[in-house]
Image: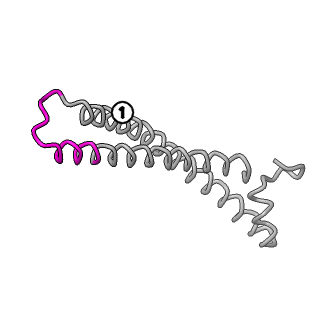
Amino acid sequence: MKESGLSKFVAATMAFLTGDTDTALALKNERLAKAAIKGQLSALEGELVNNEVAVEAAVEAFDKAVCPSKLISSQEGYVNGVLDAKESLDSAEATLAATKKTIAFLNSLLKDKF
C-alpha cells in the first residue's frame, strides 16, 4: 500500500478517473481483479500437478520406447516409436513450463500491481 492507503492498482486507476464515484469503482475493480487472479492461480496449481504427472508418464513412455521389453520386429517402427515418444515428452515438458511461467507471472502481477 502507498502512503495514502491505496494500492498501486487503485492509484493507477485513479490517475485515469476523478471523483468519489470513481474511487469506489477503482476499489471494486481492485477486489475483482485480485479475486480473478487468485482464482486463476488456484486453477493453475491444480493444472501444474496434472502437468507434472503428464511429464512423468511421458518420461516413462519414452524410456520404454527406447528400451523395449520385446524383440524389435521393425526397425522403422522402433525409430518412429522413439520419435513419437520424444515428441510427446517435449510437448508435456513445454506445457509444464508454460504453466509455471503463467503462475510466476500472475504471482508477480499480484505483488507488483496490487
**Location of residue 19 (image quadrant):** bottom right
State yes or no: residue 57 in magenta: no
Residue sitting at the far top: 69
Residue nearest the observer in this picture, 99 or 77: 77
Residue 22 vertical position relative to residue 93 in the rendered view, above or below: below
Residue nearest the observer in this picture, 71 or 34: 71
Residue 82 percent coordinates (x, y): 27, 42
Residue nearest the observer in this picture, 39 or 4: 39
Residue 56 percent coordinates (x, y): 36, 33
Residue 91 vertical position relative to residue 29 in the rendered view, above or below: above
Residue 13 vertical position relative to residue 44 in the rendered view, above or below: below
Q: Amino acid at mark 1?
A: Glu
Magenta-highlighted residues: 69-83
Residue 29 percent coordinates (x, y): 65, 61
Label the magenta part by its dominant secondary structure: helix
Q: Residue at x 19, y 42 (%)?
A: 78
Q: Which residue is mark 1?
A: 56
In this figure, what is the number of numbered marks?
Answer: 1
Residue 26 percent coordinates (x, y): 71, 63
* Mark 1 Cα shell of 10 Å, populated few (<14), some (14-19), many (≥20): some
Describe the element under mark 1 as helix, strand or loop: helix
Q: Is residue 50 left or right of residue 25?
A: left
Q: How is the image coloured?
A: one colour
Q: Residue at x 9, y 38 (%)?
A: 73
**Location of residue 68 (image quadrant):** top left
Q: Residue at x 33, y 44 (%)?
A: 86
Residue sitting at the far right: 3
